[in-house]
Amino acid sequence: MSAPPEGVLLIDKPAGMTSHDVVAAIRRHLGGVKTGHAGTLDPFATGLLLVLLGRATKLQSRLMGLPKAYETLAALGSRSSTGDPEGEIEQTGRVPPDPPPLPTGEVLQRPPIYSAVKIGGERAYKRARRGESFQMPPRLVTVYRFEQTWRQGDRARFEIECSAGTYVRSLIADLGDAYCLELRRTRIGSFDVAHAGRPPRRGEPWRSPEPLAIERVLALLQEGHPIGFAP
């Protein structure tokens, strides 16, 4: 009998699936192997998800602490209650300047109320869905790069490199009247979405990408984070 797979799978999460959906689908496909992930992506978001198999689940905290890179398409002149297309949209017509002031360095931000941050032991999004009124505590994050790469009318694209724990939805909302239409995570530390495979889908054949061996992952962690910013 062959040994169960272990290591780190690089998965390109599609829109519409939660990170939990991806992990559960891989666990089913691999026959119940111990499985986890290193950093949630919102359901509307796409891009790199690190899925941990077997002993690699012990590396979760180290991998979650890596810096990350994103690309986002923002809608300007509107607000969203969730900071993304799934919320209640209010069109204001107030468009941020071009180019807008884009903060870098240490930034004090409030995570969205529709987030997985725990408030009083409960996920914030659950309280928000019940209509409760509360304020998210601010957190200090680091933005290494924040650039507007394209703009036309009420749409703009941005590339962002930031520390773990940064909410891109909050960065975009803080520009003024703006929210994320699309969000894609392109890198986590040294791991690039260009090397990622797709997740399994029900009713479709799936060939698992080759997981990165734990030794290789540890070596990448030792090498640092060649992602365009300091670790």
Image: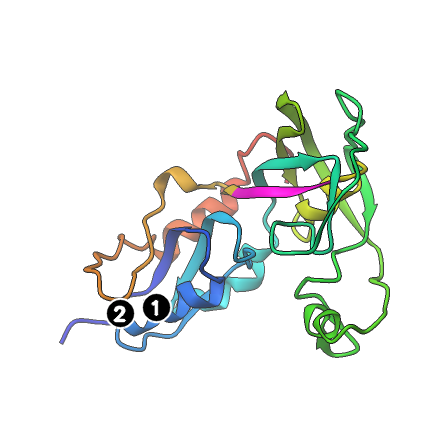
Instruction: Give the class, few, some or many, for how many residues have Cα within 10 Å of label 2's Cα (few <14, many ≥20).
Output: some
Residue 175 against residue 217 in the figure, above or below: above
Distance from Cα at disc 2 to Cα at disc 1:
6 Å
Are dots 2 and 1 in contact, CB under 8 Å? yes
- Mark 2: secondary structure: helix
Q: Seen in the image, is 113 located left or right of residue 215?
A: right
Residue 96 against residue 41 in the figure, above or below: above
> Which of the 4 quarters of the picture holds residue 149?
top right
Amino acid identity at mark 2? His
Q: Is residue 199 magenta?
A: no
Instruction: Give the class, few, some or many, for how many residues have Cα within 10 Å of label 1's Cα (few <14, many ≥20).
Output: some
Q: Seen in the image, is 228 located left or right of residue 80?
A: left
Give the residue number, with chain letter if any, for mark 2.
Answer: 29
Q: Position of residue 124 (x, y in %)?
A: 73, 69
Q: What residue sits 33% from the left and 66% below the top?
A: 26
Q: What residue range appears in magenta?
A: 178-184
Give the residue number, with chain letter if any, for mark 1.
Answer: 25
